[in-house]
Amino acid sequence: MVMTYKKYLTALTAYLIAINLQAQVSAPTGNEPRNPKGVPGLEEGQAGALNRNWLLNATDDQERFRRIQIYAGGTYEQMWQVGYRYQQVYQAIIDENWELGLHHWVKLRDVFNVALMKRPRRTPNAEAMFLDNAWKQLEEALQGGDAEDIQEVFLRERGTCMACHIAEQVEFLNDTPSFRDTANFPPE
């Protein structure tokens, strides 16, 4: 196989970048390790040296669980994923790919329940307004495969999401591209 000069330069560049990145990762910075100021209580919970074993070097399991809970955070990761999957459902409806839409819709429900586990105060509205009723309607519509019905139900779901945000006093979430971009079929 003859390698062209352009392919050779591309391969050489990729190799040099990889070596440089490896050197950056493995080379010590010269800084002394310390716990971040933004996470209270880490010093008191530290049993071993500060290194990559941030969890194993905790004083005990209670401190390990506390650190995992901090790491897992609130609902922001789950709600980011809910937003992503919501947009994927919308696109699947546009593409009339009902199986993909249903796949994302089911995953959206699962991720949403994880978020509710972390924030149980939000569970009553989320279940009453969305999970126990509205969610099932779009699932059934996607299974039915009627494009017009699916679009109509999706737009109702959108309204339910927005109403829940208002009920939970986070209505600023409704003024986002996720909701502006999914207001119509076909998209404008």
Image (cartoon, rainbow, N blue to C red):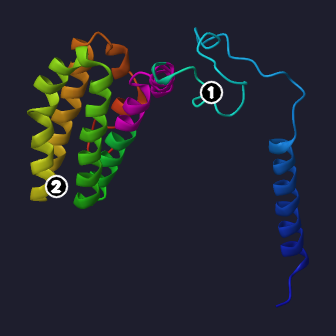
How packed mark 2 is, by other alpha carbons closer than 10 Å (few <14, some 14-19, many 20 or more), is some
Q: Nearer the viewer, residue 165 or 27?
A: 27
Residue at the outermost bottom position: 1
Q: Is 116 left or right of 153, judged from the image as shown?
A: right
Left or right: 14 as drawn, with respect to 145: right
Residue 127: which quarter of the image?
A: top left
Indicate the amino acid at tag 1. Asn
Q: Which residue is mark 2?
A: 147
What span is colored magenta in the figure? 63-83
Q: What number is the disc on residue 57?
A: 1
- Between residue 186 and residue 38, name the one nearer to us: 38
Q: What quarter of the picture does the N terminus occupy?
A: bottom right
Quick check: can you spot residue 49?
yes
Instruction: State whether residue 10 is above or below residue 48.
Output: below
Q: Secondary structure at mark 2?
A: helix
Q: Amino acid at mark 2?
A: Ala
At horizontal 58% and vertical 23% (from top left) the residue drawn is 58
Instruction: Identify the disc placed on residue 159.
Output: none
Instruction: Indicate yes or no whether the magenta region holds residue 69.
Output: yes
Residue 159, given in percent of the width and then of the height, sits at: 20, 28
Location of residue 161 in the rendering, given as x and y in whole percent from the top left corner = 24, 27
Q: Residue at the spot x=12%, y=57% of the render?
A: 143
Spatial CA distance of label 1 from label 2 is 55 Å
Badges 1 and 2: C-beta atoms under 8 Å apart? no
Q: Name the main secondary structure of what is drawn in magenta.
A: helix
Q: Is residue 49 above or below residue 143?
A: above
Residue 33, percent from left and from top: 78, 22
Residue 95: % across, % down: 31, 58
